[in-house]
Image (spheres, helix red, strand yellow):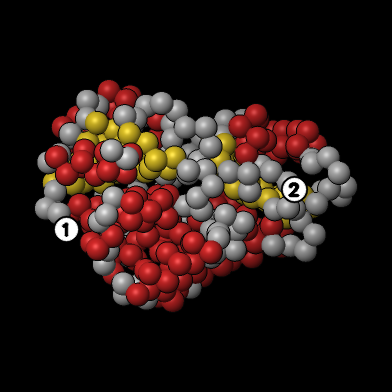
Amino acid sequence: MSEAQSILSAIQTAKRIVIVAHKSPDGDSIGSSMALYHLLKKWGKDVRVVHPDPAPEFLHWVPEQSTIVAFDEHTEEAKKLLADAEVICCLDFNEPGRVGKEMQPFLEQAPGVKIMIDHHLNPSDFCQFRISETSACSTAQLLYEWMDEAGILSDLDATIGTCIYLGIMTDTGSFRFPSVNPHTHRVLAHLMEAGVVHYQIHEQIYDTNTIDRIRLRGYALSEKLVCLEDLPIAYISLSADELERFNYRKGDTEGLVNQVLGIQGIQMAALFVEKDGAVKISFRSKGSYKVNELAAAHFEGGGHGYAAGGISYTSLKETTEKFVTNVYQFIPVT
């Protein structure tokens, strides 16, 4: 029996299923979670989505997103759901620490069968079943491929397809990253044939900016952008006070690091955001510049070669200084 069939069998024989994704949810984690949620609801399963924290506002339009149980807001309910689940589907992360230190022990101790579907590097061995493909552009595409390999693609509908399309679109920078291939576009075509209205998804993600969000981005790009003189590298750092000044809401800096990377001649970009007692970091790169090793070596993070994240518990100033000091180690040899 193939891994896809084994996963299907485990899900079909279970009654209570929980879907989990990583902390600080993004379009791929929300999209893949809700795609699987809608598929299992169609099958009549008792299924819940438990995430470490709530979705940012720009993802609140996703069908039935409001049913997600956020561990940091509904802790006791989330604990019970994890403990009672017969199957726990772990999507878009491959190491239990990615759900955050508060939720991690309850995920690890949960007795249910664990299934991983993910596309990040270096998966840990905490799931009984695993689809891990680092060349895939997104977990959402892997979910589609699992449905195909398991012979259940006939259950694809516009709602499931919308969630999958969201995950692929956001994790590929609107289909422009090197991980996108002809197969990805064939998947997208099938999703549209299933009833997905692609331009509406794009509008929901990219055309719903608030005035405060636009002003924050304008300030960040005009006042906080730093370009290293001797390297094709640029970064922005935003303090907690600066976020408060622009009435920051979760998700307001989403995609900002990609704008920095879009500057002519820039090969690596970083965004440092101070909030909740830590500095959260987003890295992006292109060409021969890779950021996942930098994130892992110095900022307790990781990810893909061209997109990674990290965290720092020192001050914003110390964190950016550490970045500037250590980034030279990761310059590609020409």
Question: Who is closer to the viewer here, 160 or 258?
Answer: 160
Q: Which mark is residue 42?
A: 1
Q: Earlier in the sequence, mark 1 or mark 2?
A: 1
Q: Which mark is residue 288?
A: 2
Within 10 Å of disc 1 (Cα), the crowding (few <14, some 14-19, many 20+) is few
Q: Position of residue 142 (x, y in %)?
A: 41, 51
Within 10 Å of disc 2 (Cα), the crowding (few <14, some 14-19, many 20+) is some
Query: Disc 1 residue type?
Result: Lys
Please name the residue shown 24% across and 31% down the image.
113
Question: Who is closer to the viewer here, 109 or 277?
Answer: 109
Report how many numbered discs are placed on residues in the image: 2
Query: Which residue occupies the extreme front position in the image?
Result: 1
Residue 26 in view: no
Cα separation, mark 1 vs mark 2, equals 44 Å
Q: Position of residue 145 (x, y in %)?
A: 38, 53
Residue 86: name its quadrant: top left
Query: Disc 2 residue type?
Result: Ser
